[in-house]
Image: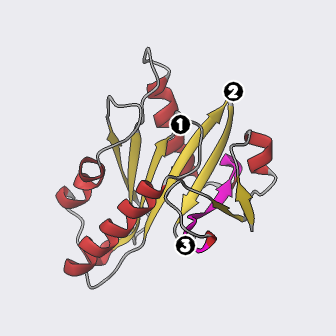
Amino acid sequence: MAIWRHWEANDYLAYEGELLAFETPDSESPRDWPVVEVLSPKRLSLDENMAVSLIFDELSKRSREVELGVLLINRSDGKTEIHFINNERRDAIDGNAAISPLSRTAISADRIASVQFFHNHPSRGPLSRADIEIVKRWSKFFGLDNTYRFPFHMYSVSNFDGKLVVFHYGSR
């Protein structure tokens, strides 16, 4: 496992498919460092790549880069519900707004295979500690009402002058 310092795309992609730990300002020891998987788009499924494309297609229409998201609700029958999460902030997406489509879906919990949330990072960094905490809160909240315990996955996508790097938290 490597330790993150602010790198460029090729530095990250040298660890493609591997885990990368990164130090955060509030980390007291390396045991507190978030650990994420580093991926390139070629390792993503068709639906996952579509989520990434939706984000960057929408960003291309805007005058400034903000964080945007796409929530994928993967059903056990193989179909996927796709929800675009709009946002005007550069530094964060409201975690409640991001997960709200799951509360409104007509799919019963026993029919949900997994939930994936993709968002871009204008700062070109990996997943933040806040991103990881949101996934833990979602799992805990939905776990209280959800005996099926479908997995949650969080992805951030960073664009390094046209070269995309995907950071993943969760089990694949």
Q: Is residue 39 visible?
A: yes
Q: Amino acid at mark 1?
A: Ser
Please determine whether, in this image, residue 14 is positioned above or below residue 27. Answer: above
User: Quick one: label 3, few (<14), some, or many (20+) residues within 10 Å?
Assistant: few
Along the viewing direction, whichever of 100 and 137 lies nearer the viewer: 137
The residue that label 1 is drawn on is 53
Along the viewing direction, whichever of 3 and 46 lies nearer the viewer: 3
Apparent side of residue 129 relative to residue 97 in the rendered image (left or right): right
User: Quick one: label 1, few (<14), some, or many (20+) residues within 10 Å?
Assistant: few
Which numbered tag is attached to residue 161? 2
The residue that label 3 is drawn on is 171
Please determine whether, in this image, residue 61 is positioned above or below residue 127. Answer: above
**How far is the residue under mark 3 from the one under mark 1?**
22 Å
Range of magenta residues:
31-42
- Front disc: 2 or 1: 2
Residue plotted at (53% across, 36% down): 53
- All told, the count of numbered labels is 3
Queried whether the magenta region covers residue 125, the answer comes back as: no
SS at mark 2 in the image: loop
